[in-house]
Amino acid sequence: MDLRSELLKSIWYAFTALDVEKSGKVSKSQLKVLSHNLYTVLGIPHDPAALEEHFRDDDDGPVSSQGYMPYLNKYILDKVVEGTFVKENVDELCWTLTAKKNYRPEGKSVLPGTDAFRLWCLFIFLSEDRYPLVMIPDEVEYLLKKLCMAMSVELNCVELEDFISQDSVQQNGFIVWAFLEMMNSGKLTRGIAKETISMAIEEVYREIVGDVLKEGYLWKKGQLRRNWTERWFTLRPSTLVYFTSEDRKDCKGSIQLDGNCCVEVLPDRDGKRCMFCLKTLTKTHELSASDTKQRQEWTTAIQTAIRLYVEGKNSLHKDLKLKRREQREQREKRREAKEQELQRLRALQEERERKMAELELLQEAQRQAQALLEQDEQRRRQQHEQLQHALEIQLKEAEEARASMQAEMALKEAEAERQRTRIKELEGMQQRLEEALQQEIKARQDEEAFRYAQARLLAEEEERMTALMALREEQEEYIQRAQREKQELRQEMESKSRSLDEAQRQLEEVRANRHRVDQDVVDAQRKLRQASTNVKHWNVQMNRLMHPIGPGEKKSTVGGSFSGFRLSSQKDPALRLKQKTDDQSDESKENVENIENISGCEGDRRISKTSNGDMEIP
């Protein structure tokens, strides 16, 4: 179905909505408004004079759909360029016009306006290409199954069959308003929340009408920073677009798909599981799914999109719709062929019955002829006995009559032989028909056996899949336990490393304190040696000054008195010097004792740090 056909279906609903009197005609003023709105939503330059110019030869009356179609094709549809407008806006315009007239839900409506619009779009997409638009029951069942699959429920086929059997449903299919009435009745969605129904309708609408092959979260590895980021991916037949979240407002990029693209499954690495890559001519995009099932679904969907691009198809569901239509046509042809075969068999049966009736008639005629012959023979015998003498004269004539009678009997015997041969052929044909019927019965029995075997294989496959999922869960639990143990070991190593760094720092402090104390001890020893030297010097000076005067030394009185005075004057400084020297010696001793005490304290402190740090000082 091309773009023109899709647009025509929506516009047909808008045109019929403007036909208030249901006469098949619409006024020119309403067509002008409709055409103006179509120009706007289709992105075509407005041409207000085109409608008047097209209908300038007509009267002032309304215009039929056949009269509006040439204008619609020439001035609107021929100028439409795909990609320059949004198809959903056209559908919203046509839905707004037709819903005001035709969509009037009675009582408590199950569907809001948005869901009704999306179901209307789905109906247009799946409807047949003939007007008035209808959707055959097979397509209705297909759409309802898609909705039920999106809601994770089973389709109520009994309610669907009851609705199809109603008088409101046409023989050739559903009209859109009957379909919306069925959905609004709530019989098929009984016990399901409205939010669930709306989400299912939106999902199916995006899949079928929006050509979305698959949507969901995937982890994507960056091209520059090489980090993993979770993105919402939307796959269409030609592109793979990814967003920040599922509201699809912030688009982070897109990947163009063509015949040069391919998908490959990757082994688990970098802490990521269920990895696969999408290769293009210029880049390789690494992706990671949540589980193996999602990875299989994504790889299959991407391969389907690449296949559609290679085959020149832009919509998967359009292709599926054509295939379903071809399958229906093939089923119809097979049904017609089967009916023709049954008619032929019935004709053969009737022919066989007719032949059997003819055969019975021939046998009856033969019996009657035999009875007549016996009667004639008896009569002739009686006449022979009565007219023996008279017949002797006419013996020659009687012999000739007898010969002619024998010839006639031979002809009748040949005819009877041919009838018996025909009977044998008909019996052989009946036997072959019975053999063909037996073969058909056997083929159906074989088909039932194959179906039973296939169901059994599917059940075994499901059991194996369940066992595989259990093993996978055990493996994931083991991996998580190993990761927790690894994290605890890493934390213990970090704590020991911090303890080692703290001990190293204390060792450096002890070494610095030891070096400082050694410097203080050296300074104290140097001061002690200097003080000892000073003490020795002053002791020598004091001994020299306090040496007594020996006898025999002569001094003058004046001189003696002066010498006594000088000695006494010198004696006092010597005493003062001795006292000063003693004080300095005491002070030096005190300094030495203090230095020894300090050294002892520092030594004790070094010993205590050594015992606390469990390390030896060199």
Image (cartoon, helix red, strand yellow):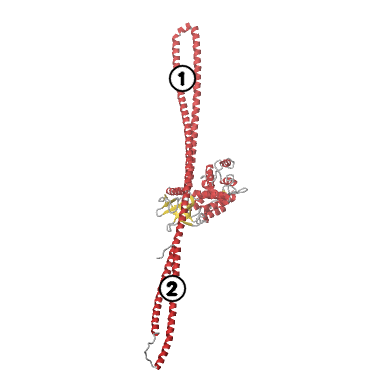
Can you give x and y, in whole percent of width and height, for residue 543 in the image?
39, 83
Q: Nearer the viewer, mark 2 or mark 1?
A: 2
Percent from the top left, x then y, of residue 588?
43, 77
> What residue lies at 47% left-to-right and 26% top-to-bottom?
430
In this view of the protein, can residue 18 be seen by the observer?
A: no
Marking on residue 107: none
Looking at the image, which is closer to me, 291 or 388? 291
Tell me the residue that label 2 is attached to: 595
Q: Which quadrant is the C terminus positioned in? A: bottom left
Q: Judge whether residue 588 can be spotted in this image.
A: yes
**Foreground of the two, 22 or 558:** 558
Which residue: 45% across, 14% down?
405
Q: Above or below — where is 398 with respect to 307? A: above
Circle 1 is placed at which residue position?
416
**432 to 574, vertically: above or below:** above
Estimate the x, y position of residue 17 in percent, counting from the top left.
Answer: 57, 49
> What is the x, y in percent for residue 148?
54, 45
Report how many numbered discs are placed on residues in the image: 2
Q: Residue shown at 50%/25% (left/top)?
A: 354
Q: Is residue 549 above or below residue 235?
A: below
Q: Residue at x 44, y 11 (%)?
A: 399
- Give the amino acid type for the residue marked by disc 2 in the picture: Ile
Residue 172: quarter of image: top right
Label 2 to label 1: alpha-carbon separation = 159 Å
**Is disc 2 surrounded by few (<14), some (14 to 19) or many (20+) residues within 10 Å?**
some
